[in-house]
Structures are given as structure tokens and as C-alpha cells.
Amino acid sequence: MHGFKNVNADLLKIDGSFIRNIVSNSLDYQIVASICHLARMKKMRVVAEYVENEEIREAVLSLGIDYMQGYLIGKPQPLIDTLNEIEPIRESA
């Protein structure tokens, strides 16, 4: 915790090993809730890895987590592919 206290960062990413079982394991849920609370105290945004299904997504949203990563959101792909998907959206706006 001493290291966390002295970290100056904008984002904190929560490892998927905590997020994976957030719905079925109350200890994991409480750990993530505590991490989120500490991050908010330090004015950090929070990213959750391993958002794989709607139940996990709902739990993550209920904790006020700012960003999500995982197969529910999108499969990993090269940056150029992501940019190509975004470009048509920008052109039509």
C-alpha cells in the first residue's frame, strides 16, 4: 500500500483475476470495491479487465468503474483495424 500511496497516475487498471469472479465471489467484489474507493480518493479513473459477460458488466458499472476491457466489449485486434472501424463513424458525423 505504501507504493500505491505514492503513485501519481491518471488511470488504475484492475487485473482480470479480480474481475473474472466478481459476480460469484464476494471477496473479489469487496476487493474491487475497495480498490475503486482508494482510486477515487486519489482522483484516478479505473479500468476493469476481463469484462466477459453482461453480469460482470453490470457489477463493474455498479461500482462506478470508468472503463472496461474484455471480450464483451471487443476482441483484441491490431490498432489499425480499430482505427479503420472508427473512421467511418467520424465521416458520417
Image: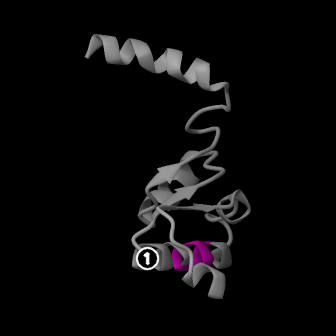
Say which residue label 1 marks: 42
- Report if residue 92 is visible in the image: yes
Quarter of the figure that contains the C terminus: top left
Quarter of the figure that contains the N terminus: bottom right
Please identify the quarter of the rendering in which residue 28 is found: bottom right
Above or below, 18 against 68 in this view is below
34 left or right, relative to 86: right
Residue type at mark 1? Lys
Residue 7 % position (x, y): 56, 75
Query: Magenta span has 31?
Result: yes
Q: Residue at x 59, y 45 (%)?
A: 69
Secondary element at tag 1: loop
Residue lying at the far right of the rendered structure = 17
Above or below, 36 against 75 in this view is below
Q: Which residues are magenta?
A: 29-34
Q: Main secondary structure of the magenta part?
A: helix
Q: Residue at x 68, y 32 (%)?
A: 76
Residue 10 % position (x, y): 47, 62
